[in-house]
Image (cartoon, rainbow, N blue to C red):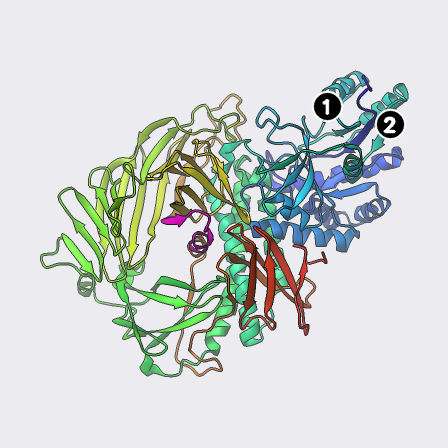
Amino acid sequence: MDMKKKTRLFLVGNAHLDSVWQWRWQEGSAEAKATIRSALDRMKEFPEFRFVCSSASVFQWVQEFAPDMFQEVRQRVKEGRLIVVGGWQVQPDCNLPSGEAFARQSLYAQRYFQEQLGVTAKAGYCVDSFGHNGMLPQILRKSGMDSYVFMRPAPHEKSMDSDLFRWVSPDGSAVTTYRIPDPYCFNFQSEEELQVRLDYLEEHTAADTELLPFFYGVGNHGGGPTIRNLEVLEAYQKAHPELEMIYSDLSDFFRELESSCREIPEYRGDLQHHASGCYSTVPQMKNGIRRSECELLAAERYAVLAGKLCRKPAKTERFREAWKTVGFLHFHDLMGGCSIREVYDDAAYQYGMALHTAAVEENNALQSISWAIDTSQPSKGLPVVVFNPNGFPVTESIAVNMQSKGVTDSAGNSVLSQLVHSTAAECYWRRDTLFQAQIPALGYGVYYLQNPIRTANPEDYQKNQPKPAGGAVTAVEFAGVRTANERRGTVLENQVYRVEFDLHSGYIVSFLDKETQKELISGPAAVPVVIDEYYHDTWSHGKNFFSEEMARFGDAQVEAVEFGPIRATVKVVSQYNRSALVQYFSLESGCGRLKIRAWVDWQERHKMLKLIWPMKVDKPEAVYEIPFGVIRRPADGEEEPGQTWTAVVGGGEGFALLNNNTYSSSVKESTLCQTVVRSPIFGDHGGPRTGESEFTGQGRFEFASELMPVRDGNWAPVIQAARQLNKPVSQIIESWHPGTLPDASYAGIQIDQENVMLSALKPSEDGKGLVIRLYETNGVETDVRVSGGLLPVALKARFTPYSVNTYYLAEGSGSWKEVLLTEYDL
């Protein structure tokens, strides 16, 4: 090896352990024991050897299964020979978990490391994930980590000036970052093999430093450095005395790097793309994880509400365990959809447990609160208590599982209502009552049903649906909400939009802004397009554009199915091969959002379903929500990961497409393309396909979307609408009883700046206080005041652009203090 440039070799012994992949979690947990045992044994045999290990789940398995070995782990950690890195529960997918989910990765892992091992991770470590969102530097910094190691995207996927750089997030947080230019695990058997690898690494490492990091050991199914690896390293050191070989803990490498480099280049933005198919594979699993995140957050907030109003203690341990389960599901090969089928059978039980925990704890909280409200006057009607989990007030249309002749608020004022289809209709022959409720932020409101019934006569069922004389629907209008069957197609209309559907295809052929009289689409919209993916593997390696259209759903049935003063709905059923797509398009009175509820029965193989929305936008640019932030990307049609919305903007305005469980989309010029489902083979890595192959994405998949206008740069209204879509209000149908709480509306929190969004409100992990987490959405410095019944003391704070801030209020204290995401001091 020519050591003219590199004279110090940092040896990073590690074992990439996939908790699941081509095996289930039980096998992964067994390998955790074997890998840690091997590393501990190597430490006895080679006194200088050090081992780097990430993921709290690995240590937790060892602690549970082998407590005696865990005592050895503690000792080696204390000696500095077993080094904790990563600071997360697992090495997660670094695009798809929500911002709060990343916070919980850090919260539970770093506190576990501190409590059980006496340390926290200082270096971020996620070597195998399929891309990394641009807010990670802030998340890492505010989790106590100042550096980061990754591998994907590789140099052939993303060209960079240097694999060593300072990665800066939109708020200005920075971490020193190293991209491993070759696989993170290298199992060499000779000095010759080692020499080839070192020559390659030297060629691909920054020229202005003498430092060379070398990651080695057996990986994927665990293993770590072998006896032979370490013998070869010792022999190589003897043969090259001019080379200083340092068994590294990663942090020492980064410290030396900071002091030895003349200048480290700066990089802003996310790190993409690798395995773009993983953004959408196995959508049923992705839906389960999204639902778990949203439901747990809401249940936590409701528990705080019940604690304040009913003195009901929150079950912090139950939430902690549920979040840790969800954190495990974030593992990159699991959430990325590239594991074997059995992994997703297990995942369904796991997110089912988290969802059940959230449902039970939410119900415990809300039932306690609703029982404490005074609803003792039968003359008011049957009480329905509606709860809002969001940090902002909402106006929302709510369907109650009961048929009523009218609805009033707690003051006796009539509110808009209408009767809509009920899933109980086949048994009870009645409809549900839909009404518009206005609910304060993280609070409740009480409404009363007038003359409600649970059952009706079959002959009355048809009478309760408003239709013109003669039975056939031709045109129905209530208070500005209208549906009509016209010669050219079916029309859906409210005070804001007029939407026209083609009767044969089911596509939207006109989307008119009634105020400006401008057409908002440039061609047929809501078009279900089938993409050919025969030559894509599960990851879609090397293929980042999904544009080979092979067919479209058609042969549609278009029908107006809801009419009333609140909501009108058109149902479109279309077909392709053996697959069916059912979409319900709704406009509500005065609402500027087109709402879509849909499900697809997908029976295709090696294909993808996209929904196409060609919008009229000049000089378009794509904007995506990422964890705790937003990012602009070229509108070039490349598949991109996102969170709950994607927008196309130009000239200061545009449109956002919200979703409740899809993560993948593309924007081609001004056309929004939502990826709904794809169906490669489970775990297909591009090898020969067998007759026993099983396909992902099969069967029924439900999803919801909303299309709304946006003002470029003002993302707060979009985020609020997306939060409502992902976690609607909850309701309790109560009885008549006395209570200590009034039936007037209650606001638990008030945030006086729209662009500061509530992320979490929870009891502190130490059990001695309250924690609130908020983030700034629009990229502007903001002074905010947060108050309300749930906060013993108002919080006043300054947010820098796109900052994520966590505050802790100790019980009995008169002031908040800012803390890390881990709830430790800054």
Q: Which mark is residue 201?
A: 1
| Residue displayed at 38% across by 30% down | 531
Exactly how many numbered labels are in the figure? 2
In the image, is 297 to the left or to the right of 2? left
Q: Which mark is residue 244?
A: 2
| Residue displayed at 34% across by 52% down | 593
Q: Position of residue 309 (x, y in %)?
A: 53, 75
**Pointer 2: residues within 10 angstroms few (<14), some, or many (20+)?**
some
Describe the element under mark 1 as helix, strand or loop: helix
Q: Nearer the viewer, residue 289 or 819?
A: 819
Q: Position of residue 324 (x, y in %)?
A: 62, 52
In the image, is 682 to the left or to the right of 64? left
Describe the element under mark 2 as helix, strand or loop: strand
Quadrant of the frame with the C terminus: bottom right
Q: Nearer the viewer, residue 686 or 178?
A: 178
Q: Which residues are magenta?
A: 705-721
| Residue displayed at 9% across by 57% down | 470
Q: Position of residue 32 (x, y in %)?
A: 71, 40
